[in-house]
Image (tube, coloured by chain):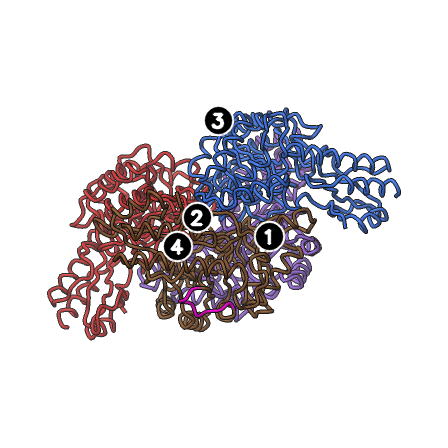
Chain colours: A purple, B red, C blue, D brown
Amino acid sequence: MIRFECDYGEGAAQPVLDLMQKTNLEQTPGYGMDEYCAKAQELIRRLCDAPQADVHFMVGATQANLTVIDAALKPWQGVLCADSGHINVHETGSVEATGHKCLALPSVQGKITAQQVKDAYEEHWALDNHEHVVQPGMVYISNPTEDGTLYTKEDLTDLSAVCYDCGLYLFVDGARMAYGLTSEGNDLSLEDYASLCDVFYLGGTKCGALFGEALVILNEDLKKDFRYAIKQHGGMLAKGRLLGLQFLALLDGEDGTGKSAYFQMAAKANNQAMKIRRALEAKGCKMLFDSPTNQQFPILPDAWLETLNQKYATSWIARCDDSHTAVRFCTSWATRDEDVEALLADIAAL
Amino acid sequence: MIRFECDYGEGAAQPVLDLMQKTNLEQTPGYGMDEYCAKAQELIRRLCDAPQADVHFMVGATQANLTVIDAALKPWQGVLCADSGHINVHETGSVEATGHKCLALPSVQGKITAQQVKDAYEEHWALDNHEHVVQPGMVYISNPTEDGTLYTKEDLTDLSAVCYDCGLYLFVDGARMAYGLTSEGNDLSLEDYASLCDVFYLGGTKCGALFGEALVILNEDLKKDFRYAIKQHGGMLAKGRLLGLQFLALLDGEDGTGKSAYFQMAAKANNQAMKIRRALEAKGCKMLFDSPTNQQFPILPDAWLETLNQKYATSWIARCDDSHTAVRFCTSWATRDEDVEALLADIAAL
Amino acid sequence: MIRFECDYGEGAAQPVLDLMQKTNLEQTPGYGMDEYCAKAQELIRRLCDAPQADVHFMVGATQANLTVIDAALKPWQGVLCADSGHINVHETGSVEATGHKCLALPSVQGKITAQQVKDAYEEHWALDNHEHVVQPGMVYISNPTEDGTLYTKEDLTDLSAVCYDCGLYLFVDGARMAYGLTSEGNDLSLEDYASLCDVFYLGGTKCGALFGEALVILNEDLKKDFRYAIKQHGGMLAKGRLLGLQFLALLDGEDGTGKSAYFQMAAKANNQAMKIRRALEAKGCKMLFDSPTNQQFPILPDAWLETLNQKYATSWIARCDDSHTAVRFCTSWATRDEDVEALLADIAAL
Amino acid sequence: MIRFECDYGEGAAQPVLDLMQKTNLEQTPGYGMDEYCAKAQELIRRLCDAPQADVHFMVGATQANLTVIDAALKPWQGVLCADSGHINVHETGSVEATGHKCLALPSVQGKITAQQVKDAYEEHWALDNHEHVVQPGMVYISNPTEDGTLYTKEDLTDLSAVCYDCGLYLFVDGARMAYGLTSEGNDLSLEDYASLCDVFYLGGTKCGALFGEALVILNEDLKKDFRYAIKQHGGMLAKGRLLGLQFLALLDGEDGTGKSAYFQMAAKANNQAMKIRRALEAKGCKMLFDSPTNQQFPILPDAWLETLNQKYATSWIARCDDSHTAVRFCTSWATRDEDVEALLADIAAL
């Protein structure tokens, strides 16, 4: 079975393992207070052009999401998000477990708009008894979204402006940040994220690391005592250097031109994904979402799907009609060209 | 600086890294549903002689503690523990963050007794208004304790009997399980843990893994839906196989005689620790705790400590009097004999 | 201003105050362990034909809702409810504050169906990674609903059967129970609630008491230690007898024929509400919801609303189009006939 | 049985019931937005000489405690308190249920000192890994304490100064405030509380009301959105005016000289309590705590206790030795002089 079902099916990019091996027996302080974390933090600050940013390494995306949201919100505040947002549907209510409601907004192609945020905010405060209703305190978006789509620079600028006006934090889940930054559909840079968001992260788990996400906090209010929040939620790795090391390996040599492994691998994966998309479109398949990134969501005739699934693992997404099903094909930093070629041939032969 | 301050200062035992590298590009299902996790679970069940046990791999000890306790207790229940217990003092209130009070009992050398548990239970239920007071629902102990000491088989048997009689879960934090099992002071086996506890874990982080603990659930009531609990707290690793792989590497070849790396490395660390202890005792130093494991807590004249700290990192534990300080010397699976020899020589020269 | 905006604008039915005054200086044990609570509990058990039921008196509806839900669910479970359900929209996320997600289902006229519950349950368990998604653990409905509508005996029987099949608790918020039971549209009895639900309550606050709801627990699993849950959430009234006394006063003389104040007052209020509805319908107004109870939701031309609001307070519900607004007219146990007559005359004169 | 076991065994002072009856059928807005609440808030602000204070009426003391603490603290902060503090021992872990640890300090006669607070604060921040330990965020004291003792003006001034220096909130639980303010041992005024605390309350439940506490918030940071916190915890009474009315009745005519029912009744109860104390001391009994307020804690020979308990209910406090038991005698606003006289005679006859 060749797996296209997700982008976390393999281990890690080789430079990650190499650097771990190389430094394995060095003795460092625990809990992320080591030199490797410090270097990785400095590198990320530089790539974001945000010398004042706080950078923390989190063990995973759900952990990052719940920790940031819990730390940021007052007990009676909730987080505005797309109804398809990861925190709303695929994290077992981890945000609610910290006491906060996900205030889901109807999304289109995985995205919500600045206008929706503004309306939700104004509707809340227009209520006579607004204290009977959860108060919006933050906006959470994923970019790329769970549907593979992208917020543009204009989208993010508008969201940022509304959030600023309304006193809402803007938090971007960048679990697939590398695929977003290197997509042909992208016009955002790390500097843009750093200047438009209060907090965001560069995903590692899905972008070549064994695990880990690099959280960048821009807003001063969110910086204070954040390490307490990490520890309280069980997210402070004893051997914290493992997180710093991985980002050092992935971003090694990065100068903003995308030459590091982190960017190169993602660009290749996007390229592979677009080939798969075009092959399917050439056969007349529609796409459930218009994704320019490493996740593709074709709507397939059931017979075709059955054929492909004998050889290729995909993720089930939705039943579309009596004879069609939408599935997800994921490429990743680890996807082999020969596997893509085989798939393309098999698609052509359908 | 040679570091004796903790047992998580290095990376991982070489077999761990080797197995990760070897399997790196294999494609497996995520979230611990892979073959490596299945094999490691089966191996651990066999070593525990507990074919019915559920085994889950957790990313770290705080995560394991808060997840188990939150999953096991009713909202109004608390967890009885030593006042020096890790959950009570060094996890930023993570148990309270899930809504449960740590019901701290005075400890001696890091240990609590079956009698204390029985008394606490009976005092609770003897209260007229017992519903105004947190109800004991579980007993948490660490073995080895935070002070390096050990519960004996008799201790654990007594605790287990009281817990059974009182309807309390018995949970053993085994973050340093390998050091406990291989200590000269130990008379417990994994089979004993499995037959006496409701849930316990074999630590990985401090015993040769990069990270991770192997949680063993014996009590049927605690098994149901436990994976939801892991996910909700952000503890479900996307590349879950990394956890299974590590325990496979550490326990490779284990047949109950302690021949695997997990046991061999810990036995050596205990041995090193006892050498350090004896050297200090030979110089007239008293020990704050009577530990037969890899953590030693000498009470040192300040001048001696200052001298040693120029070369060796230790952990500060307590100020004992005007001129003495208790510190911790930790050995680990990674401690080099030459570093111990150097320390012994320097102690002798004090 | 004559207030039709809600059903909690006045104090309490006179028998309530009389009984409080009469017993005021008696000394009783605190926290609901007194004779008056015992008598009220016994009376309610008899009216429900549920001798095994546990009855607890709660200070208010939000308190009752959050306490029941928190006590019943495992940490990773959520509560299925109408998207218009009180817990989902008007309790400041109190359910989420206890760690549980409201799993909102699209409602029609404030109601959800057994089929929706069944579908939600089956969809959950059909997921590959169901542990990544909040597990349904309970169904919460309000009857009468927030829209004034009623579940029929068939509706409730179907919901009960699905819940039983799926292992979900069925919880009925009866904040306006008296208005429901005495509505012309009702075919349910207290015995029906007791035999079909796991837990429900008879509202006091909106039905003639100063405050308080009488919670009836039928399911054995929910009975254990429930007083701890009440106390933990700050809902255990020191002078608990005040709650028992109020229900004794309201239900005094009740023999199942509806002769007590609780039923008589509600029946009158329903009658008044239907008069208002018919008067508005006679003028051509449509109703937003088809309510047979004390809450009516006419869609009014803005000019008419402005006229009426000079003399009568109503609650704003929704903007319907450019020139129409839906509002709520509420009658209650305290609504005076002369105020209704005045309103009817003013409606006729529109 | 004549009850001296607590101060909440009766209903309410007559003026409370009278005012409720008098205003019963008036229509007012709900949730505390009525004129009576506004007047009571204004009156309390005036008595506190704190025109900028926010005053909220809470349904009970546990509710007040958990709501204030949850609203004030960051998730990783805990509340310093006496080990005998009500929140630490008698509220079923309600503070922990909101996610926060009670950081219990050893108390003497129910009191903690400014020095203890300072030490706890400094010890926390002196830790290398302070983020692994719950951060102190607030100091909670009760005055009178649970042991009936009083903090003096000097005590409170010192605590206030330390809290200010350390950035800790100072919160005073005044469930028995009336008994404290009118005790011979008291040198504090409401103005003092208002100038020294960040937030405190005047108890109603134990001081003549049916239920309710008047919370006074002085610190600007705690004022914002506090009504959300009340609602979220189920503490917002629909008929909120009932709380305002009760404080209006109890404080009617108060001009700072203690002429209102609230103060007069408490002064009388203190007087009765001191008579009981002196009678017991005259018989040679020692007191467990040196209380100048309405709670007295004599250590009685078991035979005497048995005799007294045939006629008088008391609260069991502690077993002191083989033949002595400490119990609590409570007087209250409702204690009848003839009951005290009977008790005094029976004590004399022991």
Q: Main secondary structure of the magenta part?
A: loop
In which quadrant of the rendered view does residue B309 lie?
A: bottom left
Q: Residue B156's spot in the image, x, y percent? A: 23, 43
Residue under label 4: D88
- Residue at mark 4 shares a chain with residue at mark 1: no
Dot 4 surroundings within 10 Å: few (below 14), some, or many (20 or more)? many
Q: Residue A91's spot in the image, x, y percent? A: 52, 46
Q: Nearer the viewer, residue B206 or D43?
A: D43
Residue under label 1: A144
Q: Is residue A144 above or below residue C48?
A: below
CA gap between label 1 and label 3 equals 58 Å
Secondary structure under the numbered disc 1 in the rendered image: loop
Report whether A9 appears left or right of B152. right
Report the mark closest to the observer, 1 or 2: 2
Amino acid on which the number 1 mark rests in the picture: Pro
Q: Nearer the viewer, residue A145 or C34?
A: C34
Report the mark closest to the observer, 3 or 4: 3
Q: Reply yes or no: does residue C180 show up in magenta.
A: no
Amino acid on which the number 4 mark rests in the picture: Asn
- Residue at mark 2 shares a chain with residue at mark 4: no
* Residue sitting at x 51%, y 43%: A92
Secondary structure under the numbered disc 3 in the rendered image: loop
Q: Which residues are magenta?
A: D183-190
Label pair 3/4, CB-CB below 8 angstroms: no
In which quadrant of the rendered view does residue C87 lie?
A: top right
Q: Chain ID for label 3?
A: C
Residue B235 got which mark? 2
Residue under label 3: C51
Label pair 2/3, CB-CB below 8 angstroms: no
Q: Is residue A46 above or below residue D239?
A: below
- Residue at mark 1 shares a chain with residue at mark 3: no
